[in-house]
Image (cartoon, rainbow, N blue to C red):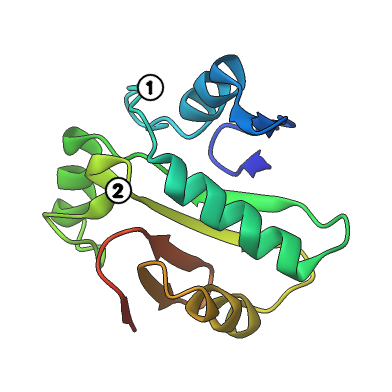
Amino acid sequence: MMNIHTGERLYATYFASGGYDRAAVDEINYFLRCHFTNEVKEIDIRLVDLLCDIKNTVGGGSEIKIISGYRSPVYNEFLVDQGRNVSRNSLHLKGLAIDFSIDGVGNGKLAQIARSFAAGGVGKYPEFVHIDVGRVRYW
């Protein structure tokens, strides 16, 4: 994965031999931190699993580009004040949502794959796809 705001890349095996590797999960939480405040929040592991399921369905060696993982209340309010299309009650605030794209895969295709899991919300935007592990809904 590559975080477009920090330029950081992460290669981690967080699940192996039937269990989650706590150190790798901690690395993922840090990687998906709010880039605006550097605040780290526990990311719901179901969300990480969903992102990996989507990537595995796509196949190949394309890189996942993270646009937004955890969003601190300060950053979320900043985006609201800037007139960005974000919810004041965004699931990003709870570590339950990720915005991403995958090199070489159209966002329409990514959204279709994400919807096939019926694991939460899926939003398709021109620059990225939003996934969350809230209630199932699509936009």
Of label 2 and label 1, which has the lower sequence position?
1
Q: Secondary structure at mark 2?
A: helix
Name the spot of residue 117 as percent of width and height, x first: 51, 73
Q: Secondary structure at mark 1?
A: loop
Name the spot of residue 30 as percent of width and height, x first: 48, 23
**Callout 1, which amino acid?**
Asn
Residue hosting label 2: 92
Neighbourhood count class around disc 2 (C-alpha, 10 Å): few under 14, some 14–19, many 20 upward: many
Query: As drawn, which residue projects farthest toward the right?
Result: 60
Residue hosting label 1: 38
Query: As drawn, which residue projects farthest toward the front?
Result: 18
Task: Single out the mark in the foreground, 2 or 1.
Answer: 2
Residue at 34% across / 84% down in the picture?
Answer: 139
Residue at 42% across / 30% down in the picture?
Answer: 33
In this view, the residue in front, 117 or 111, is 117
Note whether residue 117 is visible: yes
In this view, the residue in front, 28 or 63, is 28
Residue at 17% across / 61% down in the picture?
Answer: 87
